[in-house]
Amino acid sequence: MSARNIVLIHGAWAGGWVWDRVCGPLTSAGFNPVVVELPGSGSWNPDDVIDLDAVAEHVVAVVESLDGQCTLVGHSGGGIVASQVAELLPSRVAGLVYVAGMMLPSQMDFGMLCIEVGLASPVGISRWLVPVDDGNATVVPPEAGAAVFFHEAPVADAIFAARMLVPQLESARLMAPVWTEERFGTVPRLYVECTLDRTVPIEAQRAMQKLVPGAQVVSLDTDHAPQLSTLPELIEAIADFAQNAFSRTRRLEPAATGPSS
């Protein structure tokens, strides 16, 4: 029997460490958690072109290295990457989970969504971002990270997580997915909404659910990082959805060559 792979994709300014507490419980539940470290987070070469194509292809390579299908879990901006990978490899993706994630309509970025919803700019963490690398990247001050991302977690956990945040290339953050109903649209989806989120407000989360309909929804009364604040509930949501996703038999389709413009 193929492994029940769950590929975990972090969001902006973060890293694979955001899933540290998730992996053990998922393994105990009979899954194979695979943590991805995205390019454009923390360090990069000056000549690197790190955009949606590059980030998605990085995850595609991980998915193709695995035995059997996977469920993709995208936290925050990692949801954009998950959507794009599902468009590229719909036959290899059993399901998609968005954790306070960017389940964006095709060709719409988060800024466009905020305008659509009528949220006043700057939204969430944006007002506290500090430009670095001649403005090509940004970083989150730890005090702001703790207050905006991790405010429902125990204080020590919030401070630790906020200090783990790293610079993020803007080209790897401000992305819009490009997907079709024939490929991405065939993949089952779960949206884990976080009602107390201060950076992806619940109004934006629910707007995405309406603009990209069809996802199951689990609602958690917590902040942007349920990995720290409501771990048992998050594990239950992911595991239940993944169990059902892996039990489905889906039509195989060839992989796409890359995101289309």
Image (cartoon, rainbow, N blue to C red):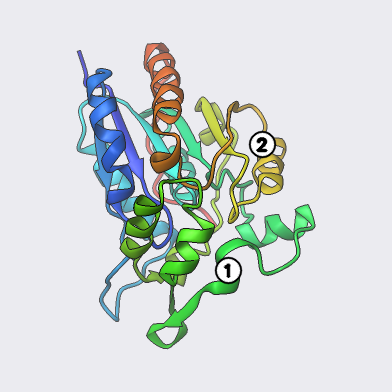
**Residue at 46% over, 84% down:** 135
Q: Amino acid at mark 1?
A: Ser
Q: Nearer the viewer, residue 165 or 12?
A: 165
Side of 147 relative to 58 (left or right): right
- Residue furthest front as drawn: 155
Q: Nearer the viewer, residue 162 or 7?
A: 162
Q: Position of residue 195 (x, y in %)?
A: 63, 40
Q: Is residue 258 visible?
A: yes
Q: Nearer the viewer, residue 120 or 230?
A: 230
Q: Which residue is mark 2?
A: 209
> What SS does tag 2 mark?
helix
Taking 60 as reference, is 123 above or below it?
below
Sequence-wise, the earlier of marks 1 and 2 is 1
Side of 119 relative to 43 (left or right): right
**Residue at 60% over, 27% down:** 217
Residue 246 placement: quadrant: top left
Q: Amino acid at mark 2?
A: Gln
Taking 80 as reference, is 39 above or below it?
below
Side of 126 relative to 84 (left or right): right
Taking 32 as reference, is 148 above or below it?
below
- Residue furthest right as drawn: 118
Q: Position of residue 261 (x, y in %)?
A: 55, 58
Q: Is residue 88 visible?
A: no
Q: Position of residue 146 (x, y in %)?
A: 45, 60
Q: Nearer the viewer, residue 10 or 57?
A: 10
Side of 207 relative to 67 (left or right): right
Q: Which residue is mark 1?
A: 126
Taking 96 as reference, is 172 above or below it?
below
